[in-house]
Image: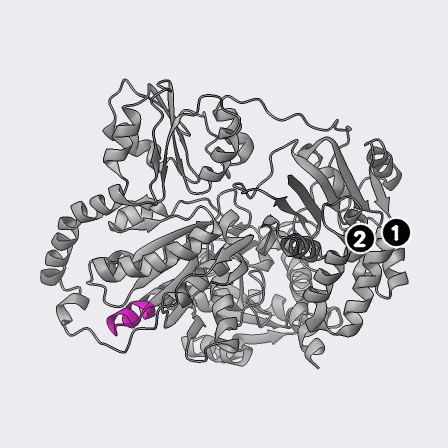
Amino acid sequence: MSEMVLLGDEAVAQGAIDAGLSIAYGYPGTPSTEIVEYLQEWKRKEDESLIASWCSNEKTAYEAAVAVSMMGKRALVTMKHVGLNVAADAFMNSVGYTIHGGLVLAVADDPGMHSSQNEQDSRYYADFARTICLEPRNQQEAYEMTKDAFELSEKLHLPVLLKLTTRISHSRAVIKRGEVRPKNEFNPSKDRSHWTNLPFLSRQNYEDLWQQRPVLAEISEKSDYNPLILNGNNRDVAVITTGLAYNYYKEAERDLENKPSHLHISFYPMPEDKIRELAGSAKRVIVIEEGYPFVERFLKGILPQAVQVDGKLNDVIPHLGEITPDICRKAMGLEAFEKAEIPEIEMPGRPPQLCKGCPHTDSYKALNEVMGEYENPVVTSDIGCYTLGYFAPHNAIHSCLDMGAAVTMARGAAEAGAHPVVGVIGDSTFMHTGIQGLVDMLSAGNKVTLMILDNSITAMTGMQQTIVESSGIINVVKGCGVSPEHVRTIIPLPKHHEENVKIIREEVEYNGVSVIIAQRACIHVVKRKYAKG
Amino acid sequence: MTYNIVLCGVGGQGVLSVAAIIARGAMMEGLQVKQAEVHGMSQRGGAVIATMRISSEEIFSDLISEGQADMILSMEPLESIRHISYLRKGGQLITGKEPFINIPEYPEQDKLYSVIDSIPGSMIIDTKNLAVEAGSQRAQNMVLVGSASKVLPIKEETFLKAIENVFTRKGEEIVTINKKAFVLGRNS
């Protein structure tokens, strides 16, 4: 079979294609974005019938995918870890359903927060929902697990969560393709009770889910994805790894004279018997896992107290950030490698920043000038390139919580007595979860100005198409009920600075909800257009 | 044989293209490759690092341990020093000479050069002028690949083929410029 060099994300996409994927939905979010991008490229070059769409947010994406499953076809949903918070309502409720066409949810976590606001561990969501989680340790496994995830989903009638992390999503390696399975035919589920969460039906579905636990446990015990290697000659220490920690441990293991017994877990729910067998062979178990101390806490519940468990809970492994080969070596009691002599020099940081010529720079310049005229201005911000307005020289924003919070937090600040209050949000983020906040604000009649920084693209994640064009956003804003004379547009360019300042000044003094849409395409979009002629 | 490279620079400088060419070359010679890279927020004008591991044996880890990099290959001087704790004793540091100054507290250049010079066997390459000579300032990253190729366990003709493969869809002129930049870097 053919070999390809793929990012982990791309391996997931290829796995889904070869598993007979019909439709994929997602919302762009680093490090998950390349899955849908690869599928879109595949559609363009190889298979016109494939659907791979960006949605306005993760919840809409997930719900659409549930319906694809209801029609008997295989669906993939992609998002980053924090996106699953947005889709959590749909995900949790779908687990009670009798999934028909395979439904796989690929979630990319970001331990180390390379491009995220937290480190949450998606395994908890799978556990919370009582479904299966698969966690690949390399690109080949990302490919194969995706195929298996679809099989499991159809066999067990469950949505399956495929957990990725930054290092697997954004690392390249050679993968070997396996067999290609045809797509499912249109085959709608006939039983309405499988897809309707009325309490009397949900009670039964929930009971069925609970009864299924032993089936999942048995699969987990037998799964090759949970390999156990026992060494009877080492009774001192045993090791459990999850995710990419496997790789770092294997590097360290080469330097260990008496290799410990080792269990790797990448199929959840966890293999309890295998864990007991491993722990029975040693006095001490070291748990090296990427993410939260998920396995470690589970161990405390099932192992006798005499077995010492080392990991994140007692700081044998750092609780913050990614696992690295060095962390692994240290935990296994190995010396660090000798380094080159390091000359002493003070290293200034080099944080990411807005690109030269970015329209947001001009928006912030105008906004700062107006805000500077007040004693206690509040600028709530959101998730996107413009969050970089936190840094010097802009120093323009006071908050950033999650997608959409620029709008809702602006309302809260205003009702707590602040003035002026400006919420700053991007076009894509506004469509994601900003609109609802605007509706709240209008209902409350707040004195708030919302600035939509519309650069016509989802820029930070790598230039994905937005759901609604600029002209559409104006209509959405007006349609929500913002007074039309207080829906203003500005062009954030230096030559319009004075005019933009004047408009912002007027609108922050308006006693109601005003919206200023700053319209200028991202410089990379403009460059691309020129390149295409 | 395992060869570990830390590639660094500033987002937008073409670090990922450097990674792509070296990875392609290694694969064409039948070696195993693992290449971890950065996407998203960290790409925009911030410090970027990519790691690459080339080996004739199975590679487990995508990441490189501190003190285990055989080479630090950097687009510019400050970034070449940022990740120096990865360099093994006797490892090679190669950096582009032209600083990328987008922060107010960028250190004095001469100070940076003297730190780099103090590392045995380090090379400072005038990538900017060589790239201009090759036909485009944007080919600085290929000059750097050329310089690294003197040390890397990959043949010159394999690199040239890899450059052709990667840049063909951008047109013949781009291929020619990048090949020339590579050769100038190799001969520097």
> Can residue A31 be seen by looking at this rendering?
no
* Left or right of B177, for residue B41: left
**Is B57 situated above or below A412?**
above
Looking at the rendered image, the quarter that the C terminus of chain A falls into is bottom right
> What SS does tag 2 mark?
helix
* Left or right of A524, for residue A222: left
Magenta-colored span: A64-74
Residue drawn at x 76%, y 72% is A495
**Is A348 situated above or below B149?**
above
Task: Decide which of A494, A184 is in the foreground and name it.
Answer: A184
Where in the figure is residue B62, as x and y percent of width and height? 55, 44
Say which chain tag 1 marks: B
Residue drawn at x 55%, y 66% is A458
Q: Marks 2 and 1, Cα distance to the nearest angstrom?
A: 8 Å
Say which chain tag 2 marks: B
The label on residue B187 is 1
Task: Decide which of A478, B136 is in the foreground and name it.
Answer: B136
> Can residue A369 be seen by looking at this rendering?
yes
> What SS does tag 1 mark?
helix
Q: Earlier in the sequence, mark 2 or mark 1?
A: 2
A71 within the magenta span: yes
* Left or right of A187, for residue B51: right
Residue assigned mark 2 = B146
- Tell me, yes or no, whether the two marked residues, 2 and 1, touch with CB atoms within 8 Å: yes
Amino acid, disc 2: Gly
The image quarter containing residue A235 is top left
Where in the figure is residue B77, as x and y percent of width and height? 80, 43
Residue drawn at x 89%, y 38% is B110
Where in the figure is residue B182, as x and y percent of width and height? 81, 57
Magenta span main SS = helix
Task: Decide which of A400, A459 is in the foreground and name it.
Answer: A459
